[in-house]
Image (tube, rainbow, N blue to C red):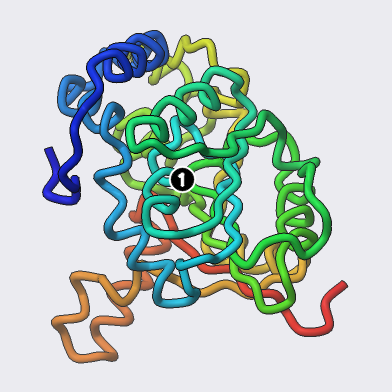
Amino acid sequence: MSSDQTAFTPNPAIERELESQIEPWLAHMRWRADFDAWKRKRLWQENYQRDALAEIARYASIQNARVLDLGAGMGGFAVAMQRAGARIDALDYNFAYCEIARTRARRYNLNLAALVGAGEALPFAAQSFDVATCWDVLEHVQTPRRLLSEIARVLTDNGVAFLTVINRYALVDPHYHLRFVNYIPRSLGEKYIALRQRTKDSPLRDKQKLSEMHYYTYDGFAKFAAACGFQILDLNQSKSRFQKYPRAVGDALYYAWRAWGMGTYRLVLQKIEGAP
């Protein structure tokens, strides 16, 4: 278990309830070589959020911040933020995930507001939040442009959003864990995924097939975000392994890796002044 876990006294009834709620949503990923460790992390997601909280703290205050965790999944990040002092609303399209998130919060005697809803139609007033997070969601939604527009609407003028975006040319696909599948036509890629028995036959209602998901190049997403009223900042670059080289060399290597290898972009979105 991660050292991020702070001491608390487990309630056996809550622990059993949480495990029984989570178990059905993991079965479709049993092909993972690290399934047991991955399952353990799903059970204790809130204890693996140190890096994410540190990223947010660089750009926004967490204590008493009004935060929207959009696509909150099983609630690990939302609960970690709530424990850190944020006033957080969690929203997910999957009713069962919202129940899991609330049970996770009860581990720590917390009452988490976990709502069922779609990111393209947020049930919140304009400028309701200082921070919005959207981890591992964009690729699965129906309409990415509508999602970003809604995030812009509910953020304050000085608010920031944190977003992950899958690289269209990821060397190892983040969902199927296969090399080079993003370098071939989608129709062939899906046949290869089926051949390797990596198809996600899950009960999730979001987009799961490779041809359905929304992947972007870095520059392509930057233009797309600008059209939705945001400028983007790259969270990965400052942690790049290429920083050990002279700056010009390190930057060149990093940009090449970002274009043709990186799996997931981690981004900060800031509103463009004067954007509608």
In the figure, residue 37 lies in which quadrant? top left
Q: Residue at x 12, y 49 (%)?
A: 3
Q: Is residue 112 above or below residue 266?
A: above
Q: Amino acid at mark 1?
A: Ala
Does residue 4 appear left or right of residue 68 in this picture? left
Does residue 73 appear left or right of residue 30 in this picture? right
Q: Quadrant of the N terminus?
A: top left
Q: How many dots with numbers?
A: 1
- Image location (x, y in percent) of residue 154: 75, 59
- Image location (x, y in percent) of residue 253: 28, 74
Q: Residues within 10 Å of mark 1 (few under 14, many from 20)?
A: many
Q: Residue at x 21, y 75 (%)?
A: 242
- Image location (x, y in percent) of residue 62: 46, 67
Which residue is more in the foreground, 228 or 176? 228
Q: Residue at x 41, y 46 (%)?
A: 77
Which residue was labeled with disc 1?
78
Residue sticking out furthest to the right: 276
Does residue 251 appear left or right of residue 87 in this picture? left
Helix, strand, or loop for circle 1? helix
- Image location (x, y in percent) of residue 201: 47, 10
Which residue is more in the foreground, 58 or 237? 58
Q: Is residue 204 above or below residue 239?
A: above
In the figure, residue 225 lies in which quadrant? bottom right
Which residue is more in the foreground, 204 or 74? 74
Q: Is residue 175 above or below residue 81?
A: above
Does residue 134 appear left or right of residue 253 in this picture? right
Q: Residue at x 45, y 23 (%)?
A: 100
Q: Quadrant of the C terminus?
A: bottom right
In the figure, residue 149 lies in which quadrant? bottom right
